[in-house]
Image (cartoon, rainbow, N blue to C red):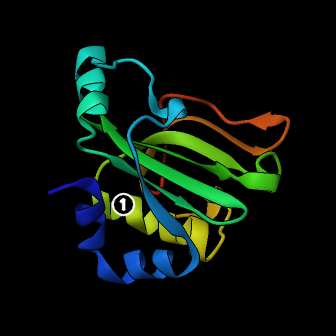
Amino acid sequence: MGLRERLAEHRQPFEAVLAVATCRPSLGFGDLLWTPLDCDAFLRRLIDGRDPGVIFETASRVVAIEEHSGELRFYAGGWGAEVYDQPHELGIFRSAEDAIRYTEAFLVRQLHPERIAVWRGLLSATYDWGRAEPSAATELGR
């Protein structure tokens, strides 16, 4: 079962997201390609076009989710004309359910990430330009 299908198992938040955002496959969202990364496996996946992640996008925000090296990685932030006007986070979810619940809060309800009570490990975050949050060990939404 692919990532999109695993997200869709959580019907209510998934359908709410699809009501406001487009959804398309993603094989290599650049911000999600940090180490550890099995480059050979990643290249085979790209060539074969298999196991895509997803990108949910609205006019002003985006959430990209992909699996790499056993991690469910994500980027959430501004998009289009508002790419620099929105808060953003880069990190790891522990489950597809956490991923779609977060996506619903960020895209449908347009909550600020600091107000989203879903666990995620953060690699980096910028909530207000000029005020970067601590990286790596930060955990939110316990």
Residue 43 visible, this orientation: yes
Against 23, is 83 above or below?
A: above
> Which residue is rendered at x = 59% and y = 44% of the image?
89
Using a 10 Å C-alpha cutoff, classify the residue at mark 1 as few (fewer than 14 neighbours), some (14 to 19) or many (20 or more).
some
Against 124, is 6 above or below?
A: below
Residue 35 lies in what quarter of the image?
top left
Give how far across and how far down residue 10 sits, in percent.
Answer: 29, 75
> Which residue is rendered at x = 59% and y = 65% of the image?
106
Q: Could you tell me which quadrant the C terminus lies in?
A: bottom left
Q: Is residue 11 left or right of residue 17?
A: left
**Could you say which is closer to the camera, residue 98 or residue 61?**
61
Q: Is residue 31 left or right of residue 8?
A: right
Q: Could you tell me which quadrant the N terminus lies in?
A: bottom left
Give how far across and how far down residue 98 sits, in percent.
Answer: 36, 60
Against 37, is 56 above or below?
A: below
Which residue in the structure is indicated by mark 1? Answer: 98
Q: Is residue 70 left or right of residue 100?
A: left
**Could you say which is closer to the camera, residue 6 or residue 131?**
6
| Numbered circles on residues, count | 1
Q: Secondary structure at mark 1?
A: helix
